[in-house]
Each structure stands twice: as structure tokens, then as C-alpha cells.
Amino acid sequence: MKEEKMQTEVLKIDRKNIDQEKIIKAANYLKEGKLVAIPTETVYGLGANGLDEKACVNIFKTKNRPADNPLILHISNIDMLYNLVENVNDDAKKLMKLWPGPLTMIFKKSDLIPDVVTAKGDTVAVRFPVDEIARAIIEKANVPIAAPSANISGRPSPTNAYDCYYDLNGKIPLIIDGGSCDIGIESTVIDMSENPPTILRPGYYTLEMIREIIPEVRLDDALVDDNKIPKSPGQKYKHYAPKARMQVYVGKGAADFIYKKARAYSNSGLHVGVLVFEEDMERFKDFDRISFGDRDDLSQMSHVLFTALRKMDKMGVDLILAEGVLDNNLGKSIMNRMKKSAAGNIEYL
Ligand code: TXA
Ligand code: MG
């Protein structure tokens, strides 16, 4: 298929002094049916007018996204929600306490929404981001903005404008640069059309945190058992994959084990890259290495994970050896991503 090349403009917005002209430009592009990459607190999104069928079809083409993987609609105030969904139950109203923020709720959809957004399904995913730039753009565009992560499908989600540019240069007219995303992994997706509400993708808001608000919340079977088919189509595809092969080690002594492996693989001629916690960085000084930050602060790890995978690719490593974490709280959300990045290659020591 012939691919049209276009000039991609990158517009930087200073968060301390948000330039309304730039917000208006992004909003106008979206209203005209164009695609714009925008920052959010989780990862960058590839935005389009969520009520414009053609623009949404273009998202799928641009990302090379499978057509059966539905999009999230982003709103900038709660009122926008009521046109998009059939009903909002009490549990959803309770969870709105976490809005605006890194939480996506799934509802039965209204007739307003084009089929392409929901992949012909009868539910729609909605998120109210807290990021000020995202909110200002949605508010000005005055339509729900469909936005999957702004990467080519299969690649790690972009957490800064450069990573968006790397994947989308020549494919979209505008990238809004709002700096690096605070959280660094995608929103928690929870299906409110199910009883009990079911987490389909863990994120910054963990099972443990949501349980405090809705005690009966459960995890999708596929998040507990690898042999089950995920309810969220996006979870079944190859995802977050660096170009290099990746192996993850979890448990006491993981750093020692990684050290031995790194020596052995590099002696056999492989270019090895290492992802470990700050305390272990010094001993890996002979290798290409990136720090996950403080072991006791997993929010640093989620913040750097995707950027680190992309940096490893830029360094041209053949093999990434990474330390993983235990599968609870934010660790569960991080391991959900790492498992996919490493194509299931995880060893518990
Ligand atoms: O943090 C985020 O959620 C980012 C930012 C840009 O907001 N967006 C994002 O979108 O991660 P995307 O498209 O990369 O991931 C959306 C996930 C996919 O796994 C998709 O299958 C699932 O949400 N999803 C969307 N609509 C759904 C629906 N109606 N039913 C089940 N899963 C749905
Ligand atoms: Mg994605």
C-alpha cells in the first residue's frame, strides 16, 4: 500500500506557562479530522476526534493496529461521559473519585460512538486524564478524543515526544511535546459493565487500591492465569517489545545472577544491556546499563521502563537482562508489561 509522507511538526508546551495558541492549534487539527500525538500522565496518546469515523480509522492505519482492538475515548469533564454511555452505575460513580487520573472505565456504549472506536463491540472505554495539556486540548476541541498509545503497535508505549517522533515521524502532522510522562505505564482499565467490576489491565491504580473503593472488584482471569484469553483485546497481542531479546529475573540474588549471565553472554560475543536498580548500577559499569531507580520506589521503575527499553534499542544491544519485581501492588502492573516485553521470558529465582 502506498504510504503518504507528511511533515511532522513538534510543538513544545511549557507546563508552567501553557501557550493557548498551541493548544488551539492542536484542538483545531483534531476538529479537522487530523491526528495529533498528545502527552498524558501515563503515556503519549495518538489522538483523533472520537466521533469522526474517518479520523479513527486513520489511527488504526497509522499505528498498524489490529482492527479488533478498541480505542479509549478521553474526556475533559464528567458531563462529557453521559453522552457516550448508556448508564453509569453506582460503582462507577464511586470510582470517579479517581478521576481525573490514570483510570479507564468501560461502559455499555451509546449510539453516538462510531463502530470503529469500539471494534464493533457494545462497550466503550472512557478516561478522564489529569494531565493539564491533554485536558486543555480536549476541552478546546470539545469532542471526546480517541487515543491509543502513540507507538507503532507492538512497540513500547512512548513516554516522551522524542519516542513519539521516532515511531510517527512522517505519518502525522503534529506532536505536542509536554515533556516526559509522570507515570510511564498506561492507565488501569476496569470493566464496569461486568458484575463484579473487572480489572482488564493493571496500571498505576492497583487492585489493592481499587478494592478500598469497590471491595468486590476482581482481576480478569487472564491476569491470573496465562492460559486464559484476555477480555481486553489489546492484552492478547505482542506488546511493549524492544528490538532486542529480553530476559527478566526476579527474586533474591537476581542482580548476582544477571551479573554472571551478562559476563557469559558478552564473552560469547553478544552486546548485552542491563536494567537494574540504582544500588547495583556500579557493579555493571562494564555494560550498557540503565537504572530503574530506587528499589523501594516502584513509581520510578514504571516511570523509566518504556523509555529504557527504547534506549536499549538505540544502544544497539542484542540482549537485555533485566531485574523484575514481585507481582503485587504496582509491581503487578510493571510485571504485566515486562512479561510481554520479554515474550514471557521470566525466571523466578
Ligand atoms: O494510559 C492509557 O490508557 C493510554 C493513554 C494515551 O490514555 N492509552 C492507551 O490506549 O493505553 P491503548 O489503546 O494503547 O490501550 C487501550 C486498552 C487496550 O488493551 C484495549 O484492548 C482496551 O484498552 N480496551 C479499549 N476499549 C475496550 C473495550 N470496550 N473493552 C475491553 N477492552 C477495551
Ligand atoms: Mg497501547
Image (tube, rainbow, N blue to C red):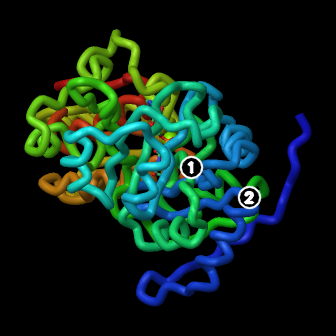
Q: Which residue is mark 2?
A: 34
290 relative to 261, above or below = below
Residue ID at (32%, 15%): 226
Q: Which residue corresponds to the image point at 11% horizontal and 35% vertical from the top-left?
A: 252
Q: Mark 2: few, some, or many residues within 10 Å (few <14, many ≥20)?
A: many
Residue 263 in view? no
Q: Report the front residue among 292 and 29.
A: 29
Residue furthest top in the image: 227
Q: Residue at x 53, y 25 (%)?
A: 121
Mark 1 surroundings within 10 Å by alpha-carbon count, few (fewer than 14), some (14 through 19), many (20 or more): many
Residue type of the residue flagged with mark 2 = Lys
322 displayed left or right of 51? left
Q: Earlier in the sequence, mark 2 or mark 1?
A: 2
Under mark 1, the amino acid is: Ala
In the rendered image, which quarter is residue 337 located in?
A: top left
- Using the image, tell me which numbered label, if any, was put on residue 95: none
Residue 210 location in percent, x, y?
A: 16, 42
Left/right of residue 196 with respect to residue 151 in the rendered view: left
Q: Please state which of residues 57 and 341 is positioned toward the viewer in this rendering.
A: 57
Residue ID for mark 1: 146
Q: Which percent across, then down, holds residue 21?
A: 63, 85
Q: Secondary structure at mark 2?
A: loop
Outermost bottom residue: 17
Q: Which image quarter holds the N terminus?
A: top right
Against 141, is 115 above or below? above
Secondary structure type for disc 1: strand
Q: Where does residue 228 sit, x and y in percent of width and height?
A: 34, 12
Q: Estimate the spatial distance between the alpha carbons at disc 2 and disc 1, rounded to whole Å.
A: 12 Å
- Left or right, 193 with respect to 91, comes to right
Q: Position of residue 279 (x, y in %)?
A: 18, 57
Point 71% across, 66% down: residue: 29
